[in-house]
Amino acid sequence: MADFGYTFSRKRLNLPQYSGNLDRLKQLSDRIIEILANVSLSTEIARGDILISPVITDLVHYTNAQLRIEYSLKVSEQLQGYLDYFLYTDRSLIIIEAKKGDLEYGFNQLAVQLIALDQWKNNKNQSNLLGAVTIGNIWQFGQLDPDKKHIEQGLETYRVPEDLDPLMRILVQALNP
């Protein structure tokens, strides 16, 4: 990250949570719990289909965000690649990086993607850029402050399905500031 002129720290993020009604949250949790007993989550595709995609599709339901999957982003030769999930509204955006099993490696990749997105957007009116890395059953957030060129990795992790309520509320709030 220093190679791109950004600093980094780890801290509790205490991200704001949506306080409104999430009408499908209980059904989402029930569906995930029901199928977990009958499916092996040993592959990235299985975790994506069973744990990640249902969260993201319900997030689109709640926010009416546009969703791009495997979104190609090229800022420079060093800052290019694919955003696994890129969700955006007129006022905000979030990227989600799905990884096979290593959150730390995944977060490093997410941080570089946030830097690329910051340079691509080059929008001084944009507040912090939010991203999440997930291995399916565990999610972790990071945010980039474009003015300070600083990335923060959240110390908190959220488990699916156990922490689905706060996880979904953070995601919804991020797209509905």
Image: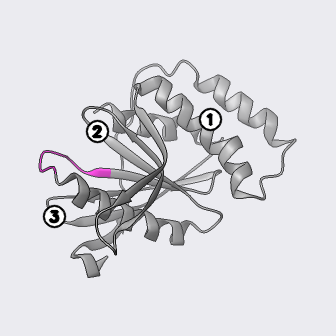
Q: Which residue is mark 2?
A: 92
The residue located at (61%, 40%) in the rendering is 53
- The residue that mark 1 highlights is 54
Residues in magenta, as a range: 123-129
* Among numbered discs 1 and 3, the one appearing first in the sequence: 1
Q: Is residue 91 visible?
A: yes
Q: Position of residue 4 (x, y in %)?
A: 25, 76
Quadrant housing residue 42:
bottom right
* Residue situated in front as seen by the camera: 131 or 140: 131
Q: Identify residue for label 3.
A: 148
Label 3 is placed on what type of residue? Lys
Name the main secondary structure of what is drawn in magenta.
loop
Please say whether residue 124 is one of the residues in the magenta stretch.
Answer: yes
Q: What's the residue at 24%, 72% (across, down)?
A: 6
Q: CA distance from mark 2 to mark 1?
A: 21 Å
Provide residue 26's location: percent of width, then percent of height. Answer: 63, 24
In percent of the image, x 47 and y 29: which residue is there? 60
Question: Along the line of sight, which residue is nearer the eye, 154 or 134?
Answer: 134
- Residue at 58 percent across and 21 percent down: it is 24
Whether the magenta-drawn stretch holds residue 80 is answered as no
Looking at the rendered structure, the secondary structure element under dot 1 is helix
Distance from disc 2 to disc 3, alpha carbons, whole Å, reads: 19 Å
Q: Is residue 59 above or below residue 147?
A: above
Earlier-in-chain disc, 2 versus 3: 2
Percent position of residue 21, x then y: 46, 19
User: In front: 6, or 20?
Assistant: 6
| Relative height, residue 77 to residue 148 (above, below) | below
In the picture, measured across the screen, residue 69 lies left or right of residue 175, that is right
Q: Position of residue 152 (x, y in %)?
A: 33, 63
Mark 2, secondary structure of its residue: loop
Please say whether residue 140 is visible from this viewpoint.
no
